[in-house]
Image (cartoon, rainbow, N blue to C red):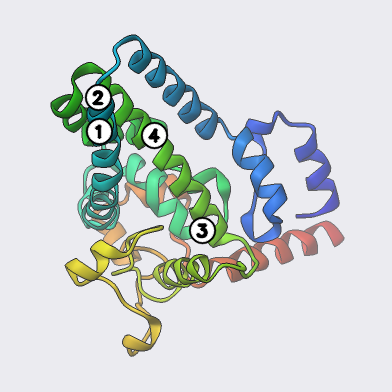
Amino acid sequence: MSHDTAADQSKLPFWKRTHYLDRMTLKELTVAYFQHYTIVAYLAIAAASVVVYVLNPAAPLRTLGAIAAAVAVYPLVWHLLHQYVLHGQWMYKWKLLSPTWKRIHYDHHQDPNNLNVLFGALHTTVPTIAVATIPVGWLIGGAGGAAIAFATGILTTCYYEFMHCIQHLAFKPKWKWVQFMKQRHNEHHYFDEDGNYGITNYLWDRLLGTYYEKKDRPQRSATVFNLGYTEEVAVTYPWVKELSGGIASGHPRRRVLGKEANENDSKAA
């Protein structure tokens, strides 16, 4: 990002600024993370859910059971959504759904380090979390159980999103377990998108046969950066291409560097 661009960004409200994770420190990420409207909204929803729980408390054991159930179900729900919805070859085929698919995942794979498209869209994530946690919480502890399970799902999402951000920072984590997660996620983005769907938990990848390490696969996937939405596919289903102004190809970072180089050359001329 050029000095002029950075200056322009500083004049914007924090929720309108563009943040690129590969150019940020962990401290800068932490500040941007807690200022992002998505995280602010999640924390507000979690706080409201805790208030509902306080007004309608469940018994201690039922409360712990609802929390445990929400934590347990989350990795499986995320895995299934990631594999069969976000990476499914069906949403872009529906004109009505194509903008949603573009926003919630295609844009992230096209530009993985852009914080603006890393977080899920609130209108899709919040209802999904509610569906995954509220019914099981209600069965365990009634209204209080439902409220605390929903709050747990929201806070678990905050944790997932922060770890997701860390996996896109240009630094090597000190902790081995974070290094492991970062390596698996980078393989998902830059080597083969068909696998390693977990963000912080790869148990379900192992159980469902989608876990891999780079050494296990002979070559890079031809669709790792476009999720199978190619120029040929766009002939029949053009809506994502139209919304994106074309289909980018090649390594996302090299595309960004090339774009910046062209912009700098234009300014110099």
* x then y, percent, for residue 96: 26, 36
Q: Three-letter amino acid code at disc 1? A: Ala
Can I make out residue 101 in this image? yes
- Of the two numbered discs 4 and 3 on the same chain, state the one appearing first in sequence: 3
Residue at 23% from the left image edge and 40% from the top image edge: 69
- Of the two numbered discs 2 and 1 on the same chain, state the one appearing first in sequence: 1
Q: CA distance from mark 4 to mark 3?
A: 23 Å
- Left/right placement of residue 50 relative to residue 88 reads right
Q: Three-letter amino acid code at disc 4? A: Ile
Callout 4: SS: helix
Q: Which residue is under mark 4?
A: 154
Residue at 68% from the left image edge and 32% from the top image edge: 14
Checking the image for residue 112, the label placed there is: 3
Where does the N terminus fall, quadrant-wise? bottom right
Image depth: mark 1 or mark 3 in front? 1
Checking the image for residue 66, the label placed there is: 1
2 and 49: which is toward the camera: 49
Callout 3: SS: loop
Rendered position, 153 above or below 225: above
* x then y, percent, for residue 236: 23, 56
Q: Which residue is under mark 2?
A: 145
Near mark 4 (Cα within 10 A), the count class, few <14, some 14-19 or many ≥20, is many
* x then y, percent, for residue 154: 39, 34
Image depth: mark 3 or mark 2 in front? 2
174 and 41: which is toward the camera: 174
Q: CA distance from mark 2 to mark 4?
A: 14 Å
Near mark 1 (Cα within 10 A), the count class, few <14, some 14-19 or many ≥20, is many
Q: Residue furthest left?
A: 139
- Of the two numbered discs 2 and 4 on the same chain, state the one appearing first in sequence: 2
Q: CA distance from mark 2 to mark 1?
A: 5 Å
- Of the two numbered discs 1 and 3 on the same chain, state the one appearing first in sequence: 1
